[in-house]
Image (cartoon, rainbow, N blue to C red):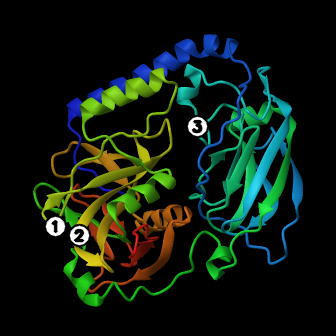
């Protein structure tokens, strides 16, 4: 669903070489890496970011503790526990799981090896087989590491799920389970939004006036001024607040050049991490390139499939804070660039899905104070990207007002 400028054959060759090198390295080292794996000694506790959920919120007072069995034979287990925003938990786990290949481990999982670079685990850089969690079951729900123990505060309301950081093939042959104790340390906030699943309730944003919407271009352009992706997200906040929110939602800033791609890819491979920061092309709004590019990608598939967006600081301010314009699309493969017959990314033509993915992932951090949809004058409902791919939309823009960190005298 996202527009990409043409990728020349040199760039394509470099990217293909990196991908093949990483694959070959991982396969060559898989046997030795697995042979030397031992259960990790320390539990890992990642950030407490979460996102949208399919579960509801319970009005009853929370129990002081719960016990949940998490089987190694399934990737996710519904705890049937609905959390309020701000609810604080202590999660502890014990037990062992054994994979079909004979690896036995506890909740901290197995130390990563080179073979893990080419996996598709829910938490890309988490230990293989580690106990993990997420708030909600939707595509935007961001998994986080739990390990042996974790103190977790729900950023928004949602249903808690626990799982194993494993692939589907691991689950098919796994035996054993973890016994997980969940203690409620604090019941959460008492505000209406604390019970709103996935973030604050939809509301009108009076500060985003029709006149302001009229002055913001509907679409971005390429270097030849050809119109492309539509502006489908507006964010109000300082640069610090913007970066903090994207980071909390696990979006990563992309590399700015092919050279940095090579270095980052090699470094992450040697560090046994997944490389997710493949660069994106430069597009223009307000007659200048994007200020930031962010991606939310699946490891392994990052070369062809990822959620990504570009951000421009607009000339406008809302209540004293900058207004940022975002063009978000979803790469789903490759296609022919109709301008020059080169290779370019193909975007999902149902572009509103990426708008809501951005909405859900950012709102799920608990850092969005208010959100709503607006329909600008002359909305874009059907168009083509600068490379010739078509897309369609209901024409609306989502507006996200970030929580202010500014000090008021």
Which residue is disc 1 drawn over? 286
Element type where label 1 sits in the image:
loop
- Image coords of residue 241 (percent x, y): 40, 62
Residue in the foreground of this view, choosing between 26 and 59 = 59
Mark 1 neighbour class, 10 Å CA radius: few under 14, some 14 to 19, many 20 or more = some
Pair 1/2: label in front: 2
Cβ atoms at labels 1 and 2 below 8 Å apart: yes
Which residue is found at the position 51% from the left and 66% from the top? 367
Which residue is found at the position 69% from the left and 38% from the top? 168
The numbered dot on residue 314 is 2
- Image coords of residue 243 (percent x, y): 39, 56
- Image coords of residue 7 (percent x, y): 23, 41
Tell me the distance, in whole angstroms, between the alpha carbons under discs 1 and 3: 38 Å
Horizontal arrangement in the rendering, residue 208 relative to residue 25 (left or right): left
Which residue is disc 3 drawn over? 120
Q: Residue 351 is drawn in which quadrant?
A: bottom left
Cβ atoms at labels 3 and 2 below 8 Å apart: no
The numbered dot on residue 131 is none
Mark 2 neighbour class, 10 Å CA radius: few under 14, some 14 to 19, many 20 or more = some
Horizontal arrangement in the rendering, residue 127 relative to residue 78 (left or right): left
């Amino acid at each position: 669903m996202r527009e990409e400028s043409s990728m020349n054959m040199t760039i394509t060759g470099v990217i293909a070489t990196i991908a093949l090198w990483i694959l070959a390295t991982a396969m060559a080292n898989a046997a030795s890496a697995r042979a030397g794996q031992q259960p990790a000694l320390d539990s890992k506790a990642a950030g407490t970011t979460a996102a949208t959920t399919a579960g509801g919120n319970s009005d009853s007072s929370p129990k002081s503790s719960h016990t949940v069995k998490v089987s190694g034979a399934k990737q996710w287990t519904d705890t049937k526990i609905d959390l309020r925003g701000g609810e604080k938990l202590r999660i502890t786990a014990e037990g062992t799981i054994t994979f079909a290949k004979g690896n036995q481990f506890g909740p901290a999982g197995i130390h990563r090896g080179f073979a893990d670079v080419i996996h598709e685990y829910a938490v890309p850089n988490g230990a293989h087989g580690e106990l993990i969690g997420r708030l909600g079951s939707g595509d935007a729900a961001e998994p986080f590491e739990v390990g042996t123990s974790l103190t977790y505060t729900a950023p928004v309301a949602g249903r808690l799920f626990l799982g194993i950081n494993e692939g589907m093939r691991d689950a098919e042959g796994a035996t054993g389970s973890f016994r997980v104790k969940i203690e409620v340390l604090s019941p959460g906030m008492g505000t209406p939004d604390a019970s709103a699943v996935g973030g604050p309730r939809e509301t009108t944003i009076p500060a985003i006036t029709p006149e302001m919407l009229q002055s913001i271009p509907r679409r971005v352009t390429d270097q030849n001024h050809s119109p492309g992706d539509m502006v489908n997200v507006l964010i109000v906040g300082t640069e610090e607040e913007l970066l903090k929110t994207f980071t909390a939602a696990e979006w990563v800033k992309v590399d700015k050049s092919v050279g940095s791609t090579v270095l980052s890819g090699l470094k992450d491979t040697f560090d046994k991490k997944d490389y997710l920061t493949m660069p994106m092309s430069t597009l223009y709004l307000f007659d200048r390139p994007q200020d930031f590019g962010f991606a939310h990608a699946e490891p392994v598939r990052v070369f062809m499939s990822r959620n990504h967006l570009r951000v421009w600081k607009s000339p406008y301010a809302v209540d004293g804070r900058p207004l940022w314009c975002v063009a978000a699309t979803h790469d789903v493969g490759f296609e022919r660039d109709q301008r020059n017959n080169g290779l370019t990314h193909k975007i999902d033509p149902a572009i509103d899905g990426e708008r809501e993915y951005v909405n859900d992932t950012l709102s799920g951090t608990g850092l969005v104070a208010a959100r709503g949809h607006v329909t600008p004058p002359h909305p874009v409902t059907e168009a083509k990207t600068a490379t010739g791919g078509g897309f369609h939309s209901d024409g609306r823009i989502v507006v996200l007002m970030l929580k202010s960190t500014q000090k008021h005298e």
